[in-house]
Amino acid sequence: MRFSEICNYVLFDGEKVIKPEDLKECDTTEVLSVFGIDRKQIVKQKWRDLLKSVSVKHTGEMYVILIGAEAQTDIHYAMPVKTMIYDALNYGEQVNEAKKRHRKNRDYRSSDEFLSGFTLDDKLTPVITITLYLGTTQWDGPRSLAEMMPQMDERILPFINDYRINLLNPLEITDFSKFETGLRPLFELLKNASDEEKLNELITKDETFTKVDVETVAAINLFVGTDIKYDEKEEVVNMCKAWDDHKKRGIQEGIQQGMQQGIQQGIQQGVQQGRCLEVYSLVQDGILEPEVGAKRVSMSLDDFADAMQKAGYKIPELV
């Protein structure tokens, strides 16, 4: 359901064209055989996060496309190249599969088809890769191959094939109503993760958060950085209540931490004060010179003299 919702948002602006039942899981390993000069077989493997074949109806006819998804929690500054490699490997594998089929059936009609391993009537299944960004900072990476290249003579540009990424960035979404699954609360919180006030307002006032499935809550904790407690045995979580409990727990932990820090600080101050009194006594008895005593407690001589007097001690010269 979530995958179809992502596809519909990116490809059809949220229109429910692709249904969950139209999806079929595919092997995410892309294998492409490349023959070099020495004719030794080289096998390259890449693993997509997710790859599914999709049956889509258009003008009364069905066609199939392959849609892959790449989840990124961090910005990838070479994402156009990464996406291009995944797609190219898949197209290469489709050609290899066609070659195997034709050799088995011996149905090549010309030497050109035989050398190509691909006939004039063969068609490739389109491959679309969606980059799902789950970070909380603005995506500032390149969105196309051209953006990764330096400035050059404009006459060269028409000869350079560009390759762009299909980026789904929750931080750029303005209408979350196009999402009906757990993606909506996740994406909304990702967009407002850096605004504590907005985050609190969303969770406590938006009815969407009164019933959130546990998988989504787990994802929110992971990607947004919250620490919302919930019972894993439950299917649905009231995030409004869980968030309120989270805040109360945070306040209590803050109080306890503050008390502990206060105790620790008091001990340190007590130790420092005791050391000062010990030095004051040694200076008053003439055992330490005032300059040495001031240095031992990291004070100037004037401040040291004032501190001694306030503590009831006298510098020998003043006795």
Image: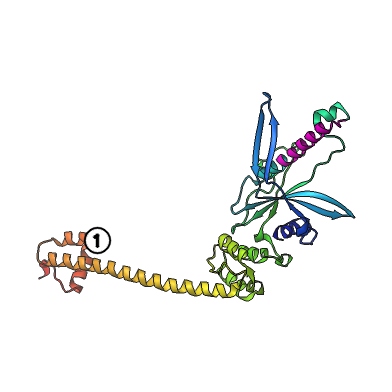
What residue is disc 1 on?
298
Spot occupied by residue 67 in the image (x, y as percentages of width and height): 74, 50
Spot occupied by residue 118 in the image (x, y as percentages of width and height): 82, 34
Q: Is residue 91 visible?
A: yes
Work out whether residue 16 or residue 55 is closer to the camera in this orientation and state it.
55
Which image quarter: residue 206? bottom right
Q: Is residue 88 left or right of residue 186?
A: right
Helix, strand, or loop for circle 1? loop
| Quarter in which the N terminus is drawn | bottom right
Work out whether residue 48 or residue 104 is closer to the camera in this orientation and state it.
104
Spot occupied by residue 87 in the image (x, y as percentages of width and height): 72, 43
Spot occupied by residue 165 in the image (x, y as percentages of width and height): 70, 49
Work out whether residue 310 or residue 191 is closer to the camera in this orientation and state it.
191
- The span picked out in magenta is 89-108
Three-letter code, disc 1: Ser
Residue 102 magenta? yes
In the image, what residue occupies the spot 74% across and 48% down? 128
Furthest-top residue in view?
A: 38
In the image, what residue occupies the spot 64% across and 72% down? 211
In the image, what residue occupies the spot 69% across and 43% down? 86
